[in-house]
Image (spheres, helix red, strand yellow):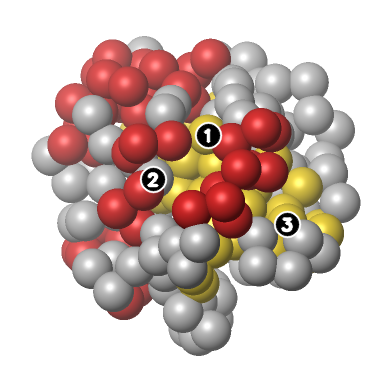
Amino acid sequence: MNLIDVATGAKLISRGAVIAYPTEACFGIGCDPFNEIAVRRVVRIKNRPRGMGLILIADHVNKLLPFIELPQESMMDPAVASWPGPYTWIFPASRRMPISLRTSTHTVAVRVTAHPASAHLSRLAGCAIVSTSANRHGQIPIRVHREVARCLGESLDFVVRGPLGHQKNPTQITDAMSGKVLRAG
């Protein structure tokens, strides 16, 4: 498995690649959210059940807005107050959003990341990025790039080298409609 830098990873995402990269707590698998073929590959790599949806990360909230349908503008306030940071929020999905990214309840999980490599990847790619933990569905997230290569290497195009953030657990997930924390961070 080839290790690459963030700038190369961003170029490859723009060309349809599926890559692994460091995030706040573990390595993530990602791609361009508008590339249906790449998104389907991510779902296959994860062996993820249909309808679970995928998280989108970005370096700025504006890159996430096209994926969200806000019944009230103020629904965004708690999320924006927590960003950038290790907080993922679930919002109603925009009707323009690719179906493969939505959950069966027509929602989408989004985060403005504070992790330097992940944020830089989004900035250089010029878009939000699909972000799901680098592991098969139901298994423990991978925290070492060598393990990513060993467990998923043949399925991925590349692995971006770099350190993980300081989170011990995956990010907190909160439902923006109810305010309920669905997963503690």
At horizontal 34% and vertical 73% (from top left) the residue drawn is: 100
Image quadrant where one finds the C terminus: top right
Q: Residue 22, relative to residue 117: is it above or below? A: below
At horizontal 61% and vertical 43% (from top left) the residue drawn is: 77
> What is the CA distance from the residue labelled 2 to the residue labelled 1?
8 Å
> What is the CA distance from the residue labelled 2 to the residue labelled 3?
16 Å
> What is the CA distance from the residue labelled 1 to the residue labelled 3?
14 Å
Q: Which residue is nearer to you in this view: 80 or 126?
A: 80
Q: Which residue is nearer to you in this view: 20 or 121?
A: 121
Residue 112 has which mark?
1
Residue wearing tag 3: 174
Type of amino acid under label 3: Thr
Type of amino acid under label 1: Val
x and y, in percent, of residue 160 in the image: 43, 24
Q: Residue 137, relative to residue 164: is it above or below? A: below
Q: Residue 5, relative to residue 102: is it above or below? A: above
